[in-house]
Amino acid sequence: MLDHKYQTFLSCVKTGSYTKTAEELFISQPTVTQHIQKLEREVGYRLFNHVGHHIQPTSRALMLAEFVQSLNAQTKKFIEKQTSHAESRNLTFACTLSLSDFLAPRLIQELQRAENFFQLRCLVANTASALDLVRQGQADFALIEGNFDKHEFGYQVLESQAYIPVCATTNHLLDKPQSYQLEDLLSETIITRENGSGSRHILSNILEAANLQITDFKQIIEIANIAAIKKLVKNDVGISFMYQKMALPLIKQDQIAQIPLIQTPVTHEIYFVYLKNTYFARELTNIYQIIRQTDY
């Protein structure tokens, strides 16, 4: 496992404070200072700049933190694999809430069928939290649709999904046989995920491309629950945007409908994300191929 100096360093990068690092690691503040000074002598460059009562990592420190985090996560995973029995093979992945609705259940079914896993775990989180789980080695990979630093992570594109506006089949927008501009929808109530979610970010990008923003809608309802969003749309409380594959079952059941837009529907990539240069690249490649072949 990591030398104490590196654990202290990672905590300092995360907290931005020697004091908070000391509290988090249950050590004294002078010990934190000693660890950082020793590490700076070891690597040969300054790790932090002091800004008021806070510390700010240098650009080289951020690169070191990224490498150390990856090394730490892979070390934990390697030891876990070495000490566990073959029949106790485990897999944990993170998934955003939107993707957990239509992708995760089918994926788990296919992984169960194709691989000999003793335990399969799916951790549902927003994009930022899912990436943190990968960084910390708590998840082997993540399925996300939000933006991320492509220099920090390894990734593969699973597919591009259409992101469409939907409403209840009783909504007045369907009364006329016409297609709408995005601006025409602003008089409606928009039902959306919370800030920080990948799907909210996609919606914001769609609106920004048309020189609009979410606050231009008549009313905004934020809710961090996909099932609740579907129910509210179905009950004609407002309109929403969602992945076409997520909406399709309800559209086929005539419970909701796609709002016809003049603009071509925006497509967005769904990503398979993992630690860059991971030791477990071969295993992850096999899992990626299973996902690619999954009919979800």
Image (spheres, rainbow, N blue to C red):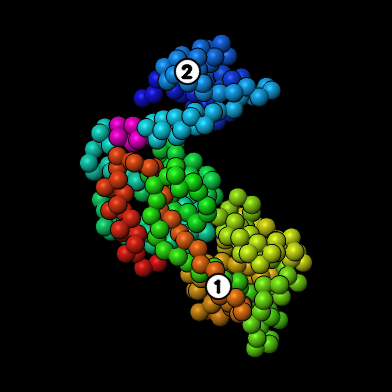
Q: In this image, 260 relative to 101: left or right?
A: right
Q: Is residue 282 visible?
A: yes
Q: Residue furthest left?
A: 86
Q: Which residue lies furthest to the front in this view?
A: 45
Secondary structure of residue under mark 1 = loop
Q: Can residue 94 be seen in this view?
A: no
Q: What residue type is labelled 2?
A: Glu
Q: Which of the 4 image quadrants contains residue 83? A: top left
- Image x and y of residue 194, in percent: 64, 54
To which residue does mark 2 refer? 40
- Disc ID at residue 265: 1
* 24 to 105, vertically: above or below: above
For the N terminus, give its image quadrant: top left
Secondary structure of residue under mark 2 = helix
Please report the residue visible at 51 percent of the width from the left and 67 percent of the height from the top: 267
Dot 2 or dot 1, earlier in sequence: 2
Q: Does the magenta stretch include residue 76?
A: yes
- Image x and y of residue 284, in percent: 31, 49
Please report the residue visible at 60 percent of the width from the left and 67 percent of the height from the top: 241
**Front-lying residue, 200 or 45:** 45
Segment colored magenta: 73-79
* 61 to 229, vertically: above or below: above
Q: Residues within 10 Å of mark 2 (few under 14, many from 20)?
A: some
For the C terminus, give its image quadrant: bottom left
Q: Residues within 10 Å of mark 1 (few under 14, many from 20)?
A: some
Q: Does the magenta stretch include residue 250?
A: no
**Front-lying residue, 140 or 54:** 54
Question: Disc 2 vs disc 1: which is toward the camera?
Answer: 2
Q: What residue type is labelled 1?
A: Pro
* 99 to 278, vertically: above or below: below
- Image x and y of residue 119, in percent: 34, 46
